Image: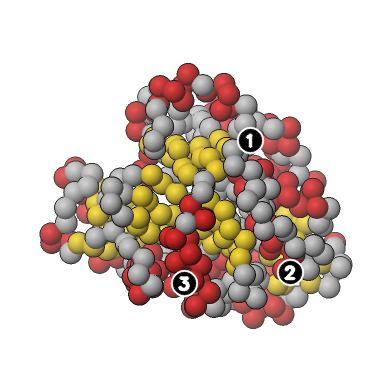
Amino acid sequence: MKAIIIFSGYNMRAIYAFIRTLEKQFVPYYIIASSTDDEIYETAYKNKVVSIRQEKKLDLDDVVFCIQQVQKKVKADYYLISPSTEALNRFILDNKKIFYDFNCEIPLVEKNLYEKISDKYSFSRICEKHYIQTPKQYFFSNIVMPCVAKPKEYRSKTSGKVLKPVIILNNNDLDIFLSKFNVNDFYFQEFIEGRSIYLLYYFYKNNTCLKYSQENLIQQKGGGSILAAQSGKNHNTGISKLFEDLFYSIGFYGLVMVEIREGVNHTYMIEANPRFWGPSQLFVEADVNFFNALLYEYGFLSKKPNDTEGKSNSIYFWDDGQSFNEENIDETIFYSFSKQDFLHNYVQWDGVNMLRREDTMKVHNKLINSGCYEE
């Protein structure tokens, strides 16, 4: 017997898409909640919680204790930990041997390779060696605005805090950035305008892959989470072939999403995420289910997912409770898509809202009524 362990509390949109897949496939899974107020308790899956962490911060003793609680209640030959968030993945890889000792399978490449892909600076260097264009890089002394400050590594070497990219549009943004961060933790790239595309992959260990793509239509301000997207065709283009060859050549396997931006004359690599990604409900409903690929490779499914084109008209939508409010919508990012058209058709978009469904309706209602979200 095999079982899935899910650490809840973060990247919940991806986790819901994953759980819906597990339910459909009758795969056994068990949830470790982040706290007693984890939003999982507002869903149809609350009875799947078998342990609760004492600390929201990932603490090894706490996490191991929770896994032991799962194992006391659920006897299995081994347990696969779902690679749901960046913080969790890095934590697991840092303590990989300990988790193996508890019969936990980790569906991730080795720590060094994982970080080379996930860290933005190192992956940019890898892409350049494979003739994939990245945005122009500036020295801080001669940056041209607008630009993007990207962390060289996941955590600051000075403060130890997790860092995220910061869009700097003007001098005021620059002053705010300098007041909050150490410049040495970042490198600076040209801000690329244009179509925002996600190339989606599951690379099997035998050097084949399942692939799909999505075009992002609406995004939270400041380059935050994707709010709306539709099926894309970029996975059948030359740029996808370059990435496929790159990942094969470095021995990568597992899930990975690569964001590219189509500028006026060139296509640029923006970043890569070798883990679950938020808008996963899109590929689930497009019948190109990367979760099924993972489940197949690790022995939970007997049949490999068909490498089909999937549905060409799938769409994804999530209302975060803030971005479409009157006071915030002007800062929300619309790609190749009119704000007026969106507002005119909001009811149709909300009809496919990934949270406005029976299993997560309480979460949806609480989010909309409170007008706040937490990623």
The type of residue carrying mark 1 is Leu
**Residue at x 72%, y 72% (from the top left corner):** 104
Residue 355 marker: 1
The type of residue carrying mark 3 is Leu
Disc 3 residue crowd, few under 14, some 14–19, many 20+, Cα 10 Å: some
Q: Going by the image, does 46 lie left or right of 232?
A: right
Helix, strand or loop status at disc 2? loop
In the picture of the structure, the residue carrying the numbered disc 2 is: 298
Whether residue 47 is situated above or below residue 151 in the rendered picture: above
User: Distance from label 3 to label 2 (Cα)?
Assistant: 24 Å
| First of labels 2, 1 by sequence position | 2
Helix, strand or loop status at disc 3? helix
Q: Quadrant of the N terminus?
A: bottom right
Depth-wise, is mark 3 or mark 1 nearer the camera?
3
Helix, strand or loop status at disc 1? loop
What percent of the width, then of the height, locates residue 206?
A: 65, 76
In the picture of the structure, the residue carrying the numbered disc 3 is: 246
| First of labels 3, 2 by sequence position | 3
User: Distance from label 2 to label 1 (Cα)?
Assistant: 28 Å
Whether residue 154 is situated above or below residue 26 in the rendered picture: below
User: Distance from label 3 to label 1 (Cα)?
Assistant: 35 Å
Whether residue 354 is situated above or below residue 210 in the rendered picture: above
